[in-house]
Image (cartoon, rainbow, N blue to C red):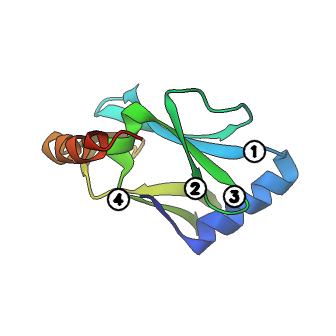
Amino acid sequence: MIEITNEAISKILEKQKTEGFLAIRLGITGGGCAGFEYVFDRCDDIPNKEDVRLDYGKFGVVINKMSIPYLVGMTLDYQKEGLNEVFKFINPKEQSSCGCGVSINFDLEQVKLDENKIFAVEM
């Protein structure tokens, strides 16, 4: 569903060891000049009925159901460039992003196709 690179896994496990969280939360939210922003946060609570939990062995990923069609097929990477370190969403459904790189827009036709496939088999 979502690929996580070895670099991202290593950094998540490092953060998990120092911060003690149970899982990470991935998703999208409305905002920014391009329309959407990615959500990447620690998750300390038990997922609710609107969440899907994916097991990646030593950690979990929690995604709200609304975000799934936007994130299916993406890769989560961790990149370090000079002094900058960032978890990077590499998503083939991204259509454009703003100049600062935080806000993104999606190919909504592709999102809708995946939404129809995913929710035809209710999770």
Going from N to C along the chain, the mark reached first, 1 or 2, is 1
CA gap, disc 3 and disc 1 = 11 Å
- 6 with respect to 96 (left or right): right
CA gap, disc 4 and disc 3 = 20 Å
Label 4, secondary structure: give it: loop
With respect to residue 56, does 33 lie above or below?
A: above
Tag shown at residue 12 = 3
**Residue at x 62% of width, y 61% of height:** 56
Q: Amino acid at mark 4?
A: Gly
Residue identifier under label 4: 73
Q: Amino acid at mark 3?
A: Ile
Residue 3, percent from left and from top: 47, 64
Q: Amino acid at mark 1?
A: Leu
Label 3, secondary structure: give it: helix
User: Do residues under tags 2 and 4 come within 8 Å of each other at their CB atoms?
Assistant: no
Residue 5, percent from left and from top: 54, 70
- Asked where in the image residue 43 lies, by quadrant, the reply is top right
Label 1, secondary structure: give it: loop
Residue identifier under label 2: 86
Going from N to C along the chain, the mark reached first, 3 or 1, is 3
Going from N to C along the chain, the mark reached first, 4 or 3, is 3
Going from N to C along the chain, the mark reached first, 2 or 4, is 4
Task: Choose mark 3 or mark 1, whichever is in front.
Answer: 1
Residue identifier under label 1: 22
Q: Amino acid at mark 2?
A: Val
CA gap, disc 1 and disc 4 = 23 Å
